[in-house]
Amino acid sequence: MIKERNLLSKVVNHLLKKEYTIIIGARQTGKTTLLKQLFQICKNNGDSCYFLSFEDFTILNSVNQHPENIFKFVEKTFDNQFTKRLFLFIDEIQYASNPTNFLKYLYDIYEEKIKIVATGSSAFYIDKRFTDSLAGRKRIFHLKQLNFSEYLHFRNADELQNELKLLRNNEDYISIKRNDISYFFEEYLCFGSYPAVVLENDREEKIEILKELKNSFLKKDISEAGVLYEHKFLQLMVLLAEQIGNLVNKNELANTLGIDNKTIENYLNIMQQSFHISLVPPFNNNLRKEITKMPKIYFHDLGLRNALLNRFENFVLRNDKGALLENYAYIRFVELYGKDNVYFWRTANQNEVDFVAKHNNIKSGAYEIKYSEKNINQNKYKIFNELYPEIPLTFITYETTDNLISKSILNL
């Protein structure tokens, strides 16, 4: 049985809107599956709908000549009276030579007679080719890798999914299934959240799928982005995988790899546009002590990160437990507050707090991530508390003690 993503209901609600629906995200996150589910929903409703893929060169070559050529492959089920709307579900629309022109033409000529729902594998293409001429004509939905709640659903652990909701909604709730949730959480941190990896039960097969993602699908991003030095690009990703949660010094990276800063900037941009990494900006109020301009690096999927390092040890045996937890916290904060509302804080004297998050443009909280409460030295955060007394600082840990000075990351 095909599993449903949380995004499905939101996109279904948008099907009745005039604007076209564009679903973007990294490769292998399930965009085609989601598109087929939407197509089936429309078909079951009795709508006139067609499913096309622009990986089919016959279709692609034809529509590249003129957008009207799409009607060589679908039937016009509407007339001048507009009695029936036509739904077109198009997979991999970024392969069109000019996706913007294709969508804009059909939108402007046929207005509400045609509704297009399309997927695009990489924001690199969306950003370069989906220009402002589509403003007001589209809405973009980002299908990410599975969040932890979806992960439990895909692992057929729906009862634990309900327990997770209780933990998140009530910090005082004590779950008798916490150890079961922890088992899956540690698996999530090691193997990540690509659907194909999650659905596979065998550990070795999980690793092989992740290696395929690294060796095949990542190289597709590299190739289609026009990267000349593939090995340098991959070396950069490995270096970044080693330093999740740390500052990204572009000069140091350029010197290490023997390439110029401009190339580093380009490669980092491609990695972001392809939904593999995020560069998190610093939070400051323009104080002289807060001079760092370098961003911090996090991966969107820890399985891909671990595959780049060929590191799949059990979570409790790992030396990078803290980094994995911090990366997970970043993913969760983005889910809660939005990517543009998550920062970190650091001074020239290297006083730092892992995250400062805003909600509705309000300074909502600061968060320090540790593996254990034993690792917390509250005196280290005195300067932050003095500078920002209005921002509460919360310690988030995985392993708690009787001191109860921190919030569990499972409650996040």
Image (tube, rainbow, N blue to C red):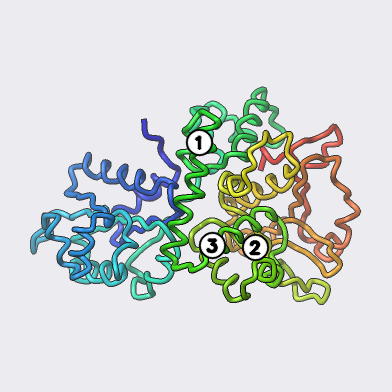
Answer with left or right where residue 72 lies relative to residue 329.
Answer: left
Q: Earlier in the sequence, mark 3 or mark 1?
A: 1
Three-letter amino acid code of the residue under disc 3 = Gln
Q: Nearer the viewer, mark 1 or mark 2?
A: 1
Is 404 placed above or below 113 here? Answer: above
Q: Are marks 1 and 2 in contact (CB under 8 Å)?
A: no
Tell me where residue 317 appears, x and y as whole percent.
74, 34
Find the distance from the CA under tag 3 to the CA under tag 1. 23 Å
Q: Which residue is mark 1?
A: 198
Q: Which residue is mark 2?
A: 280
- In this view, the residue farthest toward the left is 80
Task: Please name whichever residue, 227 or 115, is drawn nearer the observer in this view of the structure.
Answer: 227
Assign a secondary structure to mark 2.
strand
Three-letter amino acid code of the residue under disc 1 = Val
Q: Are marks 2 and 3 in contact (CB under 8 Å)?
A: no
Q: Quadrant of residue 356?
A: bottom right
Q: Which residue is mark 3?
A: 272
Q: Quadrant of residue 223?
A: bottom left
Q: Are marks 3 and 1 in contact (CB under 8 Å)?
A: no
Find the distance from the CA under tag 2 to the CA under tag 3. 11 Å
Find the distance from the CA under tag 1 to the CA under tag 2. 27 Å
Q: Earlier in the sequence, mark 1 or mark 2?
A: 1
Q: Residues within 10 Å of mark 3 (few under 14, many from 20)?
A: some
